[in-house]
Image (tube, rainbow, N blue to C red):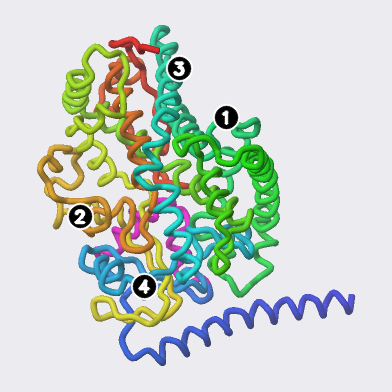
Amino acid sequence: MYQLSIFHLVLILLLFLFPLLIFWKRFKTQKSSASKLPPGPWKLPFIGNLHQLIGSPLHHRSFRDLSKKYGPVMKLELGEALTFIVSSVEAAREVLQTHELAFAQRPKTIGFEVVASDHPGLIVSPYGEYWRHMRKVCVMELLSAKRVQSFQSLREEEASRFIESISSSSHQQVPINLSKTLFLVTNGMIARAAFHKKCKDEDEFIASVKELVTLSTGFTVPDCFPSIKFLSYMTGLKPRLMRMQKKLYQILDDIIDEHKMKHDSTSKVDEEDKQDLVDVLLEVQKLNDQKFEITTNHIKLVILDIFAAGSETAATTLEWAMSELVKNPKILEKAQAEVREVVGGKGKVKESDIQKLDYMKCIVKETLRLHPPVPFVARESRKRCVILGYEIPSKSRVAVNAWALGRDPEVWDNAECFQPERFIGSSIDLRGTNFEFLPFGAGRRMCPGITLAFANVELILAQMLYHFDWGLPHGAKGEELDMSDVYGITCRRRDDLYLVSTTIIPHLK
């Protein structure tokens, strides 16, 4: 009984001291600030503003609504994590351009820390020489326009399988779970680019990556209270992540070993156009840059980064594009007419046709404006900075609400309406130079895989528009389609998209 009482006393003291310590640290930091912190909603002791996020998974929407009251730079305290929400073009420009170097860091979550261990990947690697070297490898070697072009035949093979699977359902007039089908084809394209051929554990690998990203993204309870180390074990998060890391590393070890055997048996891996992403990374590893040695674990993490960044974003974009097209049948008809006129009677869309599909490209841009797959551009301040006159302390999290910027009525006419025509002849670019439109981020940390993403999305969308007519099950009208979203790995549809297809132009194998 005596030991039990002592235990309870210690526990009570710990629970009392943790909030007191956190409060003292915050008070000391804020008191020393020369400039004022941005305004923000009321908060509670210890948990800060976490209570305002409970029961509201649509943070991009709730933050947009709060910013209307508190302004374009808003302060939140998510447990111990001091976080600033940026919701205007001017503030986004200051964070991502004017003070870009001050915000060239990404916030680390416990998920990425566990998986990366002491071998940081590109996504959350600290800004510095190593990150610049790996970024150069990705941009110049892995994801260059030339490299993406070399995967054309693999993309077209996967797209053909996709169309054939839809055709079988089309003949039976059975509703298709397009959300699930799009996830499979886009991941298949990434897997072919990474590994060239279908691997025996590919399905398990893709499912494991999806679970890993689900656990690693967003703010978990341990991420909000990083000083309380045991929380990651109490919640079960860290053990799950460690099991997931072990499983993924085992699969990648087998794939990399197979590629190494292929390298050892030949002086050079076929021609350059036959190389997959693992081949390229092994070639870079052979160069043996003594300053930046690339280990096998680095290769694993780069591959995981590519899957993590692209595993669901392309599928989510296509899912929303088809949702908007079915909801707006006149736009759908116009897009189908363009594709069918350009491709003609060839029976198959080739990538060479894509450059002529100007209206379809506007549809993709408009989809990304209204439905950016990743609604926040996440950064961490490397030093104290002032944004629109407000103090941003060092090591603070900053989230630019790209979803809110894309729907800002002060920037966009009819901001909530799906109007692809707004991009016809428009100079608005999605590569980070126009801060009202940031589906891929901006600056040094913007997504390096834009070329690969568009190659996958545009080919699949063109195929769907060319071969089939589309409608909702049971003859429902487009305006009846529920467009509710949910924020998980990406900001995707809350409910899977089920459509009925009718074959208009048979697929030519």
Quarter containing the C terminus: top left
| Camera-side residue of 190 and 72 | 190
Q: Residues within 10 Å of mark 1 (few under 14, many from 20)?
A: few
Q: Quadrant of residue 262?
A: top right
Q: CA distance from mark 2 to mark 4?
A: 20 Å
The answer to whether 18 appears left or right of 307 in the picture is right
The label shown at residue 198 is 1
Residue 173 x %, y %:
39, 10
| Camera-side residue of 365 and 507 | 507
Q: Which residue is mark 3?
A: 165
Q: Residues within 10 Å of mark 4 (few under 14, many from 20)?
A: many
Point out the tag, 2 or 1, that comes first from the N-terminus.
1
The label shown at residue 408 is 2
Point out the tag, 3 or 1, that comes first from the N-terminus.
3
Q: Residue furthest left?
A: 425
* SS class, disc 4: strand
Identified at 57% across, 49% down, the residue is 282
- Residue 81 visible in image: yes
Residue 240 x %, y %:
67, 52
